Amino acid sequence: MNFTAYERTLQGTGASRRLRNASKVPGIVYGAGAPKMIELDHNALFFALKKEAFHSSILEMELAGKVEGVLLRDYQMHPYKPVVLHVDF
């Protein structure tokens, strides 16, 4: 499965709140080297999370013009709203 992520530079509670208000989801990509902070489109991510293959396969993430293979590790949902709060790859 393919999806597009965008780099983000600001971090913290206020920055994450502004992203969520703009229908984006903050996330992080761990791996070789330093972790990369990313932002994703909420609706695309929400519907992708409903697919079983998104949870169990290597995903192709396009970030800054490069395609990287990532694996979904964790995600956080709002307790009672259908809203994704954070995602880890």
Image (cartoon, rainbow, N blue to C red):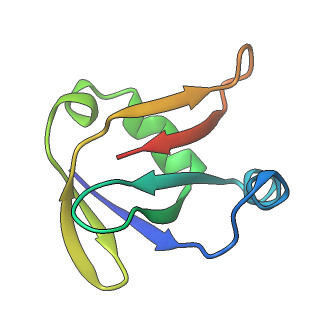
Q: Which of 36 and 6 is in front in this view?
A: 36
Residue drawn at the location 62% of the way across and 76% of the way down? 9
Decide: is 49 above or below 52.
below
Q: Where is residue 4 in the image (x, y as percent from the top left)?
A: 38, 66
Name the image quarter holding residue 65.
bottom left
x, y (%) of residue 84? Answer: 60, 35
Q: Which residue lies furthest to the bottom in this view?
A: 65
Q: Image point 46% across, 54% down: which residue?
A: 28
- Residue 77 placement, left or right of 69: right
Please give the name of the residue rendered at 27% of the width and 30% of the height, measured from the top-left corner.
55
- The percent position of residue 23, horizontal first and vertical second, equals 70, 54
Q: In this view, does 76 lie to the left or right of 22?
A: left
43 or 64: nearer the viewer: 64
Taking the view exactly as shown, the residue that stands out farthest to the front is 33
Relative side of 45 to 11, left or right: left
Q: Is residue 62 above or below residue 70?
A: below
Q: Residue at x 74, y 21 (%)?
A: 81
67 lies left or right of 24: left
